[in-house]
Image: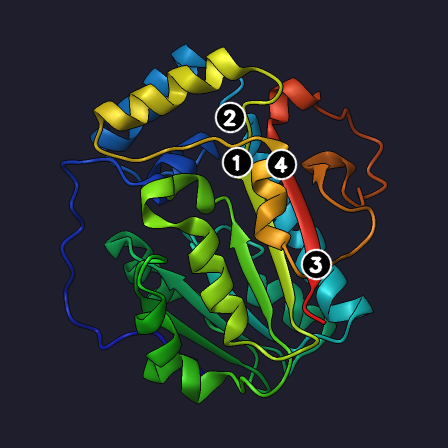
Amino acid sequence: MTGLGNGLPVDLQTDRPHPARVYDYLLGGKDNFAADRMAAEQGIKANPNSRVPPRENRAFLRRVVRTLARDYGIRQFLDIGTGIPTAPNVHQVAQEVAPDARIVYVDNDPMVLTHARALLTGTAEGQVAYIDADLRDVESILGAAELNATLDLKQPVGLLLIAILHFIGDEDDPDGIVQRLLDALPSGSYLALTHLTGDFDADAWAGVAAVYKRSGVTMQVRSRPEIERFFAGLEMVEPGLQVLPRWRPDASGGPVPTDVEVSVYGGLARKP
């Protein structure tokens, strides 16, 4: 079953970069425009490691969703800041473990909406829905008909905030945004979160943030203590907040990027 929008045409806003499309370019995708590629290439000049965080974020997302579905019995997921579908997506990972899993994707990029309509279809037993909304508008997300038709907010939910909060400046109160989302979820829910940090190469990431700012996009890298605040009042799941490749790595045997190359913390925590 799917609920992926009303089928109306959307404005793709090709004249300015969007984080989802910049990430797509950095991942080697083709669903991006000149403005996105220009911003990405300028970011690479400021920090040659810029392609590493998107790749590690996707790998962490797959691991944490599999962990939630397999080890903690989570059957409902709210993925905010979905990005352009890049297989395997959340519903594919979750429904491989539990075919009846239900997933709501949220993003504010028209291209993501277009692809979601076409690609984000799940199992017959489960459900997949899409909401066109901005993370800063928590009330629109929680009040969306698609969310309330798909998820039961009286049952535990896996809230996924992967590589999105560094696009929310302090002026928009990211701590309050996270808290309002968690307040709507019951005990036994989980928060999975990743966030860029300048802890390992402050100058390089300051350069990338400046590129984004010139393009009209907010990027605010944060320190470990600032990122830990998002988990306030929650029970951290082992191994705690880690640079991404250290969080329950797959036994792939491949080369592991350095902390400097990754520069992203990730963690999982349970709402008591």
Circle 3 crowding by C-alpha within 10 Å: few under 14, some 14–19, many from 20: many
Residue type highlighted by circle 2: Arg
Contact check, label 2 and label 1, Cβ < 8 Å: yes
Q: Around disc 1, counting alpha carbons within 10 Å, would you say few (fewer than 14), some (14 to 19), or many (20 or more)? A: many
- How far is mark 1 from mark 3, CA to CA? 22 Å
In the displayed structure, would residue 124 be above or below residue 45? below
Q: Quadrant of the C terminus?
A: bottom right
Q: Earlier in the sequence, mark 1 or mark 3?
A: 1
Identify the secondary structure beneath mark 3: strand
Give how far across and how far down residue 63 sits, in percent: 71, 52
Judging by the rendered image, the residue that carries numbered circle 3 is 269
Q: Is residue 34 above or below residue 107?
A: above
Relative to 185, 16 lies left or right: left
Q: CA distance from mark 3 to mark 2?
A: 27 Å
Q: Which mark is residue 51?
A: 2
260, 60: nearer the viewer: 260
Secondary structure found at label 4: helix
